[in-house]
């Protein structure tokens, strides 16, 4: 939350990052010269990542794509066929499952 208060009344998850951004601005800028803001770019980037999770989402998408690619390259030999997947055998096996499994 932009107010600094989270949903449960405490500080928001990104509030410490915002404090770092403000501290960096206070240390590196003056009222006459704000060229020190460039030094605060990494801290500001961390704050934006906390707010929007764009880097994390990109990383997750890359991992998922790599996982899908690896799964497609090496399919399972013992994977059940669509006809074999009935009720997963969680409760009493139905008649159709018994027929498929031969039990």
Image (tube, rainbow, N blue to C red):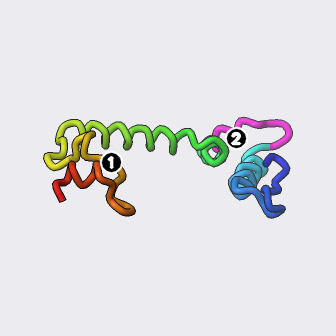
- Reply above or below: 71 against 15: above
Q: Name the residue at 76% across, 50% down.
A: 22
Q: Between residues 54 and 29, which one lies in front from this camera angle?
A: 54
Q: Quadrant of the C terminus?
A: bottom left
Q: Which residue is mark 1?
A: 86
Q: Name the residue at the left extreme.
A: 77
Mark closer to the observer (1, 2): 1
Is residue 37 inside the magenta stretch? Answer: yes
Q: Between residues 28 and 5, which one lies in front from this camera angle?
A: 5
Residue 75: x and y in percent read 18, 41
Residue 29: x and y in percent read 76, 43
Label 1 crowd (10 A; few <14 / some 14-19 / many >=20): few
**Residue 60 left/right relative to 10:** left
Q: Which residue is mark 2?
A: 36
In terms of image quadrants, where is residue 45? top right
**First in sequence: mark 1 vs mark 2:** 2
Secondary element type, mark 1: loop
Q: Between residues 71 and 101, which one lies in front from this camera angle?
A: 101
Q: Name the residue at 19% across, 53% down.
A: 101
The residues colored magenta run 30-41
**Residue 42 left/right relative to 3:** left
Q: Name the residue at 75% across, 56% down.
A: 12
Label 2 crowd (10 A; few <14 / some 14-19 / many >=20): some
Residue 96: numbered disc: none
Q: Name the residue at 79% across, 48% down.
A: 1
Secondary element type, mark 2: helix
């Amino acid at each position: 939350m932009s107010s600094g208060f989270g949903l449960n009344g405490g500080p928001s998850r990104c509030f410490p990052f915002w404090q770092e951004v403000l501290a960096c601005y206070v240390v590196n800028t003056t009222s006459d010269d704000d060229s020190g803001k460039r030094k605060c770019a990494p801290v500001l980037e961390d704050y934006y990542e906390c707010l929007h999770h764009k880097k994390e989402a990109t990383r997750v998408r890359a991992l998922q794509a790599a996982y899908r690619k690896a799964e497609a390259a090496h399919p399972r030999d013992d994977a059940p066929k669509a006809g074999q997947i009935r009720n997963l055998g969680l409760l009493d096996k139905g008649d159709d499952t018994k027929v498929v499994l031969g039990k």
